[in-house]
Image: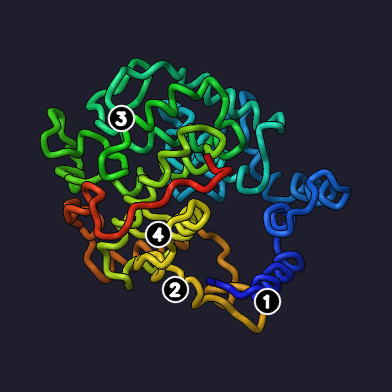
C-alpha cells in the first residue's frame, strides 16, 4: 500500500485544514464521500464558486462562452493579440477545450450555466460528423469529413467536454467513434504524417520518421477516455494506458521520476492506472510511486516538494525542461529517438496486459 490507513487519515486532516476551497470540497466528495446535498457540502461548494481561482477563470470567459486568454494557466507568450483568431482548442493551453478540465478538476460540471455555454461553443465549433468506416485500430490515414487527423490531440475537445460530465452526450458519439478508430495497435495515437511511409511526412525536425505512437498526444486521448466512464468508449482506456506504461518502461527509471517526461504527465497517469486496475508494481509505476512517496512528510501528514509553495507551476515545469536541456544538450527534445523496441510499438511486452475495467467503470 502506498500510504497506511493512518497516513491517509493524516493527509485527509491536513487537506481539510489547509487546502484551497476546491480541494477541501473534493476531499469531502471523493475521500470522505460526504452527501453532496448536505448543508455542509453546499456551503463548501459556495466557497468554491466564490473563490479566487473560479473568479479568475470565469472573469476571462468571453460572452460566447469561449476562452482565449493568457491566464496563469498558460505558458508565457500565449496572450490575446492580433492574429488569425482562435478555435476551441487552438492555440494550445489557453483556449476553451484546455480550460474546461481545470474547472472539472475543481468540481464544476455542465450544470453550471457558464460551463454549459462553453460546452455548446465547443460543439458548435467542431461540428462532429460521422467518421468514415475503418477497421478498429487500423489508424486511418486521413480524417473523415469535418474531422481533424488521427493524432491524439483530436481528443482535446472530447477531454474538455467529458471532464465536466458531457461524455455521454449523443452529439459526441461520432467523435468518440473516430478517436477509438484511430487507436493504433500499440494502444496509442500518432499523427500519420510522422510515420516513415507517410505520403506527406512532417517537415518539423524530430517528428519524422516514427515507428510508435506519440506519448504526448496519447496522454490526452487516454485522459479523455478516463473521463468517459459512462460510455462504452471507456473500454479503450486499458490499451492506451498499456502503451504509456510500456513507453515509460523503456526509459532509465531516474529519468522518469519527474512531473513531466516526454509527453507524460506522470502523476495523472498514476491516478488513471490505479483507478483502472493496472498493476501498480509494474517497474515504471513502482519507480514513480517510490519517487512520489519521497515527498511525503509524516510529521506534517502531507506531501511537499520544497520548503515554499510553487507560485507558478507552469513556469516550474518550464524550468524542469530547461534543466533537461542544460544536462543533455539544447537539441535534446528535437533529436531524441522516436523509434522504440518491438514491445513498445506493438504492445507485446512480457508483462501481462492491463485487466478489464472493474465493474462500474465502463
Q: Does residue 178 appear in this view?
A: yes
Q: CA distance from mark 3 to mark 2?
A: 37 Å
Q: Does residue 23 appear in this view?
A: no
Q: CA distance from mark 2 to mark 1?
A: 20 Å
Sequence-first disc among 2 and 1: 1
For mark 1, does the 10 Å Cα neighbourhood hold few (<14), some (14 to 19), or many (20 or more) residues?
A: few
Can you identify the residue that label 3 sits on?
136
Q: Position of residue 121 (x, y in %)?
A: 56, 24
Camera-side mark, 1 or 4: 1
Sequence-first disc among 1 and 4: 1
Sequence-first disc among 3 and 2: 3
Disc 1, SS? helix
Q: Nearer the viewer, residue 261 or 3?
A: 3
For the point 35% across and 38% down, the residue is 152
Sequence-first disc among 4 and 3: 3
Can you identify the residue that label 4 sits on?
260
Q: CA distance from mark 4 to mark 3?
A: 30 Å
Can you identify the residue that label 2 sits on?
291
Amino acid at each position: 500500500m502506498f500510504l497506511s490507513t493512518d497516513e491517509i487519515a493524516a493527509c485527509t486532516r491536513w487537506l481539510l485544514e489547509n487546502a484551497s476551497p476546491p480541494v477541501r470540497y473534493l476531499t469531502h466528495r471523493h475521500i470522505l464521500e460526504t452527501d453532496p446535498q448536505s448543508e455542509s457540502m453546499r456551503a463548501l461548494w459556495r466557497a468554491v464558486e466564490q473563490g479566487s481561482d473560479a473568479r479568475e477563470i470565469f472573469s476571462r470567459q468571453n460572452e460566447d462562452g469561449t476562452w482565449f486568454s493568457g491566464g496563469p494557466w498558460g505558458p508565457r507568450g500565449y496572450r490575446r493579440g492580433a492574429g488569425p483568431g482562435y478555435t476551441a482548442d487552438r492555440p494550445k493551453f489557453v483556449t476553451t477545450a484546455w480550460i474546461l478540465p481545470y474547472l472539472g478538476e475543481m468540481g464544476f460540471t455542465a450544470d453550471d450555466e457558464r460551463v454549459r455555454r462553453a460546452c455548446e461553443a465547443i460543439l458548435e465549433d467542431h461540428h462532429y460528423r460521422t467518421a468514415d468506416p475503418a477497421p478498429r485500430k487500423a489508424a486511418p490515414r486521413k480524417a473523415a469529413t469535418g474531422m481533424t487527423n488521427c493524432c491524439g490531440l483530436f481528443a482535446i475537445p472530447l477531454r474538455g467536454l467529458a471532464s465536466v460530465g458531457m461524455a455521454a452526450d449523443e452529439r459526441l458519439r461520432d467523435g468518440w467513434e473516430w478517436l477509438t478508430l484511430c487507436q493504433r495497435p500499440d494502444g496509442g495515437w500518432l499523427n500519420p504524417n510522422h510515420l516513415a511511409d507517410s505520403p506527406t511526412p512532417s517537415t518539423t525536425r524530430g517528428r519524422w520518421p516514427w515507428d510508435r505512437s506519440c506519448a504526448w498526444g496519447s496522454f490526452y486521448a487516454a485522459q479523455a477516455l478516463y473521463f468517459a466512464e459512462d460510455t462504452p468508449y471507456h473500454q479503450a482506456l486499458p490499451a492506451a494506458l498499456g502503451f504509456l506504461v510500456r513507453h515509460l518502461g523503456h526509459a532509465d527509471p531516474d529519468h522518469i521520476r519527474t512531473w513531466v517526461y516526454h509527453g507524460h504527465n506522470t502523476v495523472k497517469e498514476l491516478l488513471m492506472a490505479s483507478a483502472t486496475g493496472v498493476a501498480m508494481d509494474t517497474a515504471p509505476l513502482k519507480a514513480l510511486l517510490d519517487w512520489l512517496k519521497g515527498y511525503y512528510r509524516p510529521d506534517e501528514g502531507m506531501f511537499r516538494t520544497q520548503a515554499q509553495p510553487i507560485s507558478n507551476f507552469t513556469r516550474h515545469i518550464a524550468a524542469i525542461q530547461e534543466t533537461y536541456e542544460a544536462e543533455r544538450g539544447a537539441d535534446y527534445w528535437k533529436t531524441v529517438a522516436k523509434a522504440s523496441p518491438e514491445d513498445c510499438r506493438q504492445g507485446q511486452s512480457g508483462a501481462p496486459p492491463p485487466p478489464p475495467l472493474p465493474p462500474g467503470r465502463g
